Image (cartoon, rainbow, N blue to C red):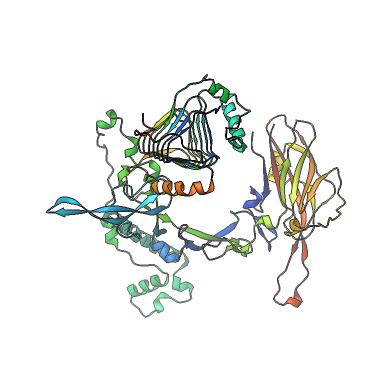
Amino acid sequence: MNYDSLRIAKGAVVCAEADLRGDVTVGASTIIHPKVRIFAYAGPIVIGDGCLIEEQTVIINRGDMSDEDLAKFMKETETRPPQTRGGRNAPLRSLQVQTNYVCGKQQGETLHIGSYNVFEVGTHVESLKIGSNNVFESKCKLGQQVTVGDGCVVSVFCVLDKEDHLDNMTVVYGPGNQRRKQQDKPMPQTQQLEFLAKVLPNFHNLKKSNVSPSPEPIGKK
Amino acid sequence: MTECEVNYTCACGKCMPLIHLFFCKYCVTLRCPKCVSHEVDSYYCPHCLENIPSAEAKSMKNKCQSCLECPNCTNILQVRSAQVPMVRREAGKVKGFGQFKKVYYLQCSFCFWTTRDVNQPDKAASNGPWIEPQVEDTWMIGIINYYRHLIQKEKVEMEKRKRQRRGSFLGSLGISDKLLPFSKLARSSFSMNLTGSGQFDENVLNNFTPVEPKEETEPADEKYYTNPGEPYHYASIASRINQPSNEVYYACDLKPNCTHLMVKRSQRCRECEHNLSKPEFNPSSIKFKIHQIALRFVPRFRIVKMASLTSGEFSKVQFSLTNPTEYNLPVELLPLPDSHFFYSKLTTEIQLPSKELVLAARDDTAQYDTESAIQDFDDDPEIVVARRMNKLTFVINVKPLVSSGDVTMGFQLKYKYKAMTPSIRPEEQKDPEDVNVMPCVTVVLGSI
């Protein structure tokens, strides 16, 4: 029995070395690099179309997981290969999450991520609602209480962990989390997505897609 | 908890970390940045690394004309290109779109500010021009002109006063004014030209009208009290300070700033006027022609391992000394002289090593050697904890005398510096002369 109900739309490129656990849905032509950790602990995670999720990104539907448990989980999954030989997710010792999840004990809120978002290297996302066309630059961190609109940019190493809402087209930058409104949306990374979709399968094993793309974009409610 | 720190005492009495200090080979003392004279070697742009002559730098108001900064976050702006369809117009009306055209605009890669945000039109060429030449305000020109004349006037008056005090300038040369074959007016202007003073116009000074202060200001608009306002519409205080001449109020009025130039400085000892530090001229080089920083001449004292300090009890604190010189260096630790200003602030009793500690010579290749030649230094195992290359770790017994507050200690290092006396002829080159150097070291070990 597989632990997870992983749904990958056709055209999405999800590397086998990425660690996806729980009820995760990945939209069409989304690229997920190796060493990405997506972890639907407290509820499902839905990722829209054309997202680019780079290495070492963590997306976690955290629910009521304590900081200690989160730190333990991070530490364990950092070095552990995501899959066993049989292709199953390697069981985690630090948490009883998988059993909890499979038994359906926790069915929390869904974490929605819209379309054409870019998560650069080392992003940490716990936010439950993210719009489309956003850019999250390297090592930025979004807490659980943050909701993000469309066309926002969170700059390098900005940490947003208080209750907050980023309006459409907000730019958060600098050491003091300064804010600005921009006029245009960040450019969609279509060229980069196409290139990666061509190149990544040459060097990595992929997780098979098992869902044909839905007529409606998955990220939209 | 205060931070631990180790400071060395400069010849002027200031205490500073060793990394900030210079060492004058000729006076054989430490010099702090306040005891040396700083000289500007060259001006350069920190972004394009172009060297700019000082006269040109002055005329450009110390700014680089080719590199532009973001007015929001002061990062360098980058040129971006975009494809824009050409609009076909007939009789002023849009009749559809034609071929794509490449246009360029500036973008900050950090906060995503673009010149499009402030409605600055896109350019057809990638090199701009991005900033329009600034038209000087007539009011501003008036002020500058006024001050220029005022400076001249003050110069002349000062010169006059000097002449009155010392007799005439020419008199001091042994020539009387009256001996010169000029009229009185010509004579005064002649002596004025000699002293380098220019002309000033009395009319400019008299006709200048300063700004009148107003008793009452206009009342603020009612909307400022009632409307919440959109914070993103206004320029931040930091970005307004960056553009004082522009007097920006709204964020949409911001313009790219020119990058400020930087200088390469050289340091000179004030006592003996020898150069202590001189960087290479090329702005992209980080090397030095002369580099007498204290780190290369004075053994570096560092705290290695703290012990838990209790008042009235001796505890062993580990320290290290690193030898920067290429010869074995015997170092003695002496108590701090009571003339030192820190003496009254000492709050500990310390047991300094009675024997002198020998620091091994620095050898850059030692770590690559397969078989290291272990020298025998006859160390006292009670004092010396470890020895690795040119670093020696040892123990000092520290007894705090206060029950709370900062724990401080101080001592004097004594070692011999091999002073080379430079000679033009190699046969006259003398052997290095040993000079005693005794820098004082003050240490704050934190608080209890």
Q: Where, by quadrant of the figure, is residue B342 drawn?
A: top right
Image position of A1 with respect to B182: above or below: above
Number of marks present in the image shown: 0
Vertical relation: A112 (above or below) B269: above
Of the pair B362 and B183, the residue shown nearer to us = B362
- Residues B297 and B215: in front is B297
In this rendering, is residue B271 above or below A151? below
Q: Residue at x 19, y 51 (%)?
A: B96
Q: Position of residue B228 (x, y in %)?
A: 31, 30
* Residue farthest toward the top in the current orientation of the protein: A105
Name the quadrant containing residue B382. top right
Q: Position of residue B200 (x, y in %)?
A: 32, 64
Residue A173 in view of the camera: no
Q: Residue at x 77, y 65 (%)?
A: B433
Question: Residue placed farthest to the left in the image?
Answer: B91
The reply, left or right, for residue B158 in relation to residue B14 is left
| Quadrant of the frame with the C terminus of chain A | top left
Q: Taking the image as drawn, is residue A132 in sight?
A: yes
Q: Position of residue B263 (x, y in %)?
A: 50, 59
Residue at image coords 28%, 52%: B84
A98 on left or right of B336 = left
Q: Position of residue B215 (x, y in %)?
A: 27, 38
Q: Quadrant of the N terminus of chain A?
A: top right
Comparing B430 with B387, the one in front is B387
